[in-house]
Image (tube, rainbow, N blue to C red):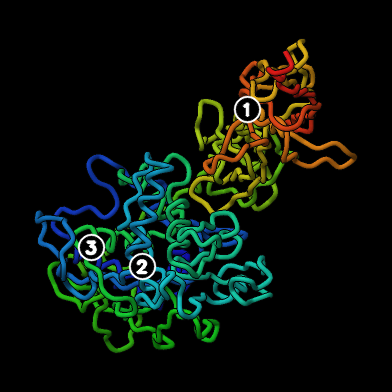
């Protein structure tokens, strides 16, 4: 369960000891020359060395809930340099429950289809899932991927955790007083409300479902213009989930481990975390959440020597209680005092605690049009003062093909001196429906969102452009029927128009007699058809055939937007050859 581990690292010596053991074991378990944070010329993201203090709603996805600090075994699934192809079998720790593994891989494919530039690897989702919930408690999920019992974090009541009052009326977490982190990827309800996804196609967005949660985590990690194939962006993504260096190193270690090879195991048989979480929440932890039973006063662990062994999971054998050192020793040189560096000043983005709407109104546009007005926000710090030069990323999410200027789905803007930032113009695509524009401060969990709607193209006027009377002898065809559609005096292109033969009367219905335009597969006449106007607003109907008893029939055209037009079609009796 993602937490501000590093933030609490400086609050208590007991937690420092746990962190020291975790970091030391991680360093010992890396292959020679393997970097933890950056490689190939990349640099770790700003703030990676020092956990940031999060304000307001807590940190990252799960609002400062604890997470598991187990590390991978020293023996990786494959030797360095060997094939990374997935083995059929392998060490128990490299096994991932079938449904959970399938959810991670499906999320990777789905994100690749909508945001290929992000290059999301499923192994990163697996690493976070391991740290957050032990792969959904070893894969205890049903056939649809929903956990058999709730996985809940402690109440975020400010008692050792962030203070987040209830936002979902207890719908997801069963708590109507405070929020709790929920499900395999540990989303708090307020974050799920913005990022929730339907990953298994059942029409629901459920944080307790591993398919839904994995896809939501994938989109969250890909926010902005991140390319997760680079070390820098991958670090930023993990730190956005939980801004803690220890969390980053723990996730990184599992990411490296799973990249060396893994295999599928039956649901419910995955290895459960054996080590401690990032803190001991005591009675605050609900029985439904991942369990851990560290002693009331954790003993500091020995720092392993490089190449030394630890138990699977990365935990070391505890020693008798003793006064822990104020800082963990540098791995490989236990007796040398560590070099301390001053804590850097927070960046402008890290100073932001609130992002507010500065007057953006209702966002509605017709398909193919441009949304009126700007989407604008204002960034402020804990004192309510504006924050300049903070990075705000605006992202379009949802099923429509709406985009910003240039076709981008996501853009990053720096705040001005007054703390404001405006998104570029938003252009509606052809797909109608609702979508969301999310504004988020980079590297933090501070965000706000805007609902928007794309409506169908409309016409308020339909006019027949032909002048001849439409008369045909039974069995023959009528002359071409052409009309023009307009909206507010301008040509209305790409507007849906329904043409129907109707009966007379105050409440006409489709006529089952008279002229028709085609036949269906069974050979029966078709008297209703839906068409679309040309870009210039013109519309040419298909040929209509004269049929039925002689008389005058009505053809009604109805356009999206309400415009209607009734055209009369007259059927004449065929002359009797004998009469002539």
Question: Residue 400 bears which disc, if any?
Answer: none
Q: Which is more toward the observer, 534 or 512? A: 512
Q: Which residue does the image show at 63% across and 47% down from the upper left?
A: 449
Location of residue 331 with respect to 391 vertically, above or below: below
**Picture disc at residue 100:** 2
Toward the viewer: 51 or 179? 179
- The residue sitting at 19% across, 76% down in the picture is 310
The residue positioned farthest toward the top in the image shown: 467
Residue marked by disc 1: 532
Q: Identify the mark nearer the N-term, 1 or 3.
A: 3
- Dot 1 falls on a residue whose secondary structure is strand
Judging from the image, what secondary structure is the residue with disc 3 in? helix
* Mark 1 to mark 3 CA distance (whole Å): 55 Å
Identify the mark nearer the N-term, 2 or 3: 2
For disc 3, the marked residue is 257
Q: Where residue 113 appears, x then y in whole percent? A: 39, 43
The residue shown at (52%, 35%) is 411
Question: Residue 218, how many percent across, how many down?
Answer: 42, 53
Q: Residues within 10 Å of mark 2 (few under 14, many from 20)?
A: many
Q: Between marks 1 and 2, how big is the CA–CA gap?
A: 45 Å
Q: Rounded to the nearest whole Å, what is the CA distance between mark 2 and mark 3?
A: 17 Å
Q: On the picture, is 433 further left or further right than 512? A: left
* Quadrant the C terminus occupies: top right
> Are the residues flagged by discs 1 and 2 in contact, CB closer than 8 Å?
no
**Comparing labels 1 and 3, the label whose residue is closer to the camera:** 1
Q: Residue furthest right?
A: 506
Is residue 483 or residue 555 the one in the foreground?
555
């Amino acid at each position: 369960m993602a937490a501000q581990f590093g933030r609490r690292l400086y609050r208590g010596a007991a937690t420092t000891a746990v962190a020291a053991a975790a970091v030391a074991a991680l360093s010992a378990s890396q292959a020679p020359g393997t970097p933890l944070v950056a490689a190939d010329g990349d640099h770790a993201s700003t703030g990676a060395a020092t956990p940031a203090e999060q304000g307001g709603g807590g940190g990252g996805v799960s609002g400062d809930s604890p997470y598991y600090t187990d590390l991978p075994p020293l023996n990786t699934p494959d030797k360095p340099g060997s094939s990374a192809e997935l083995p059929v079998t392998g060490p128990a720790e490299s096994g991932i429950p079938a449904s959970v593994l399938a959810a991670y891989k499906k999320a990777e494919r789905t994100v690749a289809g909508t945001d290929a530039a992000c290059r999301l690897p499923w192994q990163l989702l697996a690493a976070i899932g391991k740290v957050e919930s032990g792969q959904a408690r070893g894969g205890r999920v049903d056939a649809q991927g929903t956990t058999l019992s709730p996985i809940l974090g402690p109440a975020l009541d400010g008692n050792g955790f962030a203070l987040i009052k209830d936002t979902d009326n207890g719908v997801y977490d069963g708590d109507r007083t405070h929020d709790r982190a929920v499900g395999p990827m540990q989303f708090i309800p307020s974050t799920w409300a913005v990022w929730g996804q339907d990953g298994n196609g059942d029409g629901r967005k459920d944080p307790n479902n591993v398919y839904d949660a994995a896809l939501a985590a994938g989109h969250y990690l890909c926010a902005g213009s991140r390319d997760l194939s680079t070390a820098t962006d991958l670090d930023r993504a993990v730190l956005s989930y939980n801004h803690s260096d220890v969390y980053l190193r723990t996730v990184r270690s599992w990411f490296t481990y799973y990249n060396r090879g893994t295999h599928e195991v039956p649901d419910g048989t995955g290895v459960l975390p054996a080590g401690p979480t990032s803190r001991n929440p005591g009675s605050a932890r609900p029985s439904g959440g991942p369990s851990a039973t560290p002693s009331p006063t954790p003993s500091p662990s020995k720092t392993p020597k490089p190449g030394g062994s630890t138990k699977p999971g990365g935990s070391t054998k505890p020693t008798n209680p003793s006064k822990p050192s104020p800082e963990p020793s540098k791995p490989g040189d236990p007796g040398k005092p560590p070099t301390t560096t001053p804590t850097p000043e927070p960046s402008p983005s890290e100073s932001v605690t609130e992002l507010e709407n500065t007057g953006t109104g209702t966002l509605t546009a017709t398909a193919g049009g441009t949304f009126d007005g700007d989407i604008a926000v204002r960034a402020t710090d804990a004192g309510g003062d504006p924050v300049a030069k903070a990075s705000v990323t605006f992202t379009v999410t949802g099923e429509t093909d709406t985009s910003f200027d240039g076709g981008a789905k996501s853009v990053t803007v720096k705040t001005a001196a007054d703390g404001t930032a405006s998104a570029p113009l938003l252009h509606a695509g052809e797909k109608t429906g609702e979508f969301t524009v999310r504004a988020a401060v980079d590297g933090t969990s501070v965000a706000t969102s805007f609902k928007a709607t794309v409506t169908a193209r409309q016409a308020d006027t339909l006019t027949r452009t032909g002048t001849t009377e439409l008369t045909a002898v039974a069995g023959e065809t009528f002359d071409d029927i052409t009309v023009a559609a307009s909206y507010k005096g301008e040509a209305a292109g790409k507007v849906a128009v329904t043409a129907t033969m109707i009966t007379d009367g105050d409440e006409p219905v489709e006529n089952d007699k008279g002229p028709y335009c085609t036949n269906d597969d069974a050979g029966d006449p078709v008297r209703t058809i839906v068409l679309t106007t040309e870009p210039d607003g013109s519309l040419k109907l298909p040929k209509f055939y004269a049929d039925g008893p002689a008389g005058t029939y009505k053809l009604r055209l109805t356009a999206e937007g309400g415009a209607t037009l009734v055209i009369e079609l007259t059927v004449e009796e065929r002359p009797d050859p004998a009469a002539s």
